[in-house]
Each structure stands twice: as C-alpha cells, then as structure tokens.
Image (cartoon, rainbow, N blue to C red):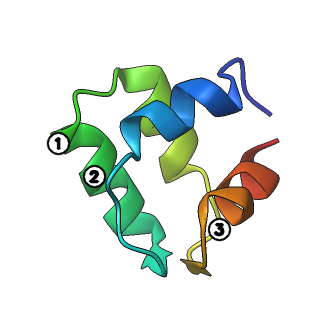
Amino acid sequence: MSQVSPIQVQKYLSGIDYPCDRDGLVSAARDNGADSEIIDTLQDLPNRTFDGPNAVSEAIF
C-alpha cells in the first residue's frame, strides 16, 4: 500500500494519546512535521478508532 516504513510513521505519531481516530492521527502527524507522503498514508486509513501504534501499523502495512 505504501512506500513509508512503520518507523517513519510512528516518528510523527509520538506523544499521541490512544485510542485515536484517523483524523486525530493525521492532525498529530501534521503537528509533528510529517511530510505529504506520511499524511497521505494516514488519510488512506479506514475511518475508525485505533487503540495503539500496532493497530496503526497493521492498518498501513
């Protein structure tokens, strides 16, 4: 699905409070300076609540 790595994604989601929905993930990544590739990857996630970093990684990869 994506060219980004789990480490890249999690770098921009550090400090986020879970559970968190897709829009919250996108907002946090933007606030942490994520580039457009990371933002696009997060925006492509299903519109649901994620209970932690592993759930985000599983949905992306």
Which label's residue is closer to the chain start, 1 or 3?
1
Q: Nearer the viewer, residue 13 or 60?
A: 13
1 or 3: mark nearer the eye: 1
Mark 3 residue type: Pro
Mark 1 residue type: Asp
Please, what secondary structure does the residue beneath circle 3 have?
loop
Mark 2 residue type: Ala
Residue 31 is marked as 1
Q: CA distance from mark 1 to mark 3?
A: 21 Å
| Percent coordinates x, y for residue 28 in the rendering | 27, 52
Mark 3 is surrounded, within 10 Å at the Cα level, by few (under 14), some (14 to 19) or many (20 or more) other residues, namely few
Whether pointer 2 and pointer 1 mark residues with C-beta atoms closer than 8 Å, the reply is yes
Q: Considering only vertical position in the picture, is 1 above or below 18?
A: above
| Percent coordinates x, y for residue 32 in the rendering | 23, 36
Q: Quadrant location of the C terminus?
A: top right
Q: Quadrant location of the N terminus?
A: top right
Q: Residue at x 38, y 36 (%)?
A: 12
Q: CA distance from mark 3 to mark 2?
A: 17 Å
Tell me the residue that label 2 is attached to. Answer: 28
Q: Considering only vertical position in the picture, is 34 above or below 52?
A: above
Q: How many marks?
A: 3
| Percent coordinates x, y for residue 22 in the rendering | 47, 66
Task: Write down the quadrant of residue 15 in the picture.
Answer: bottom left
Mark 1 is surrounded, within 10 Å at the Cα level, by few (under 14), some (14 to 19) or many (20 or more) other residues, namely few
Q: CA distance from mark 2 to mark 1?
A: 5 Å
Please, what secondary structure does the residue beneath circle 2 have?
helix
Q: Is residue 7 left or right of residue 25?
A: right
Please, what secondary structure does the residue beneath circle 1 have?
helix
Q: Nearer the viewer, residue 6 or 39?
A: 6
Residue 46 is marked as 3
Whether pointer 1 and pointer 3 mark residues with C-beta atoms closer than 8 Å, the reply is no
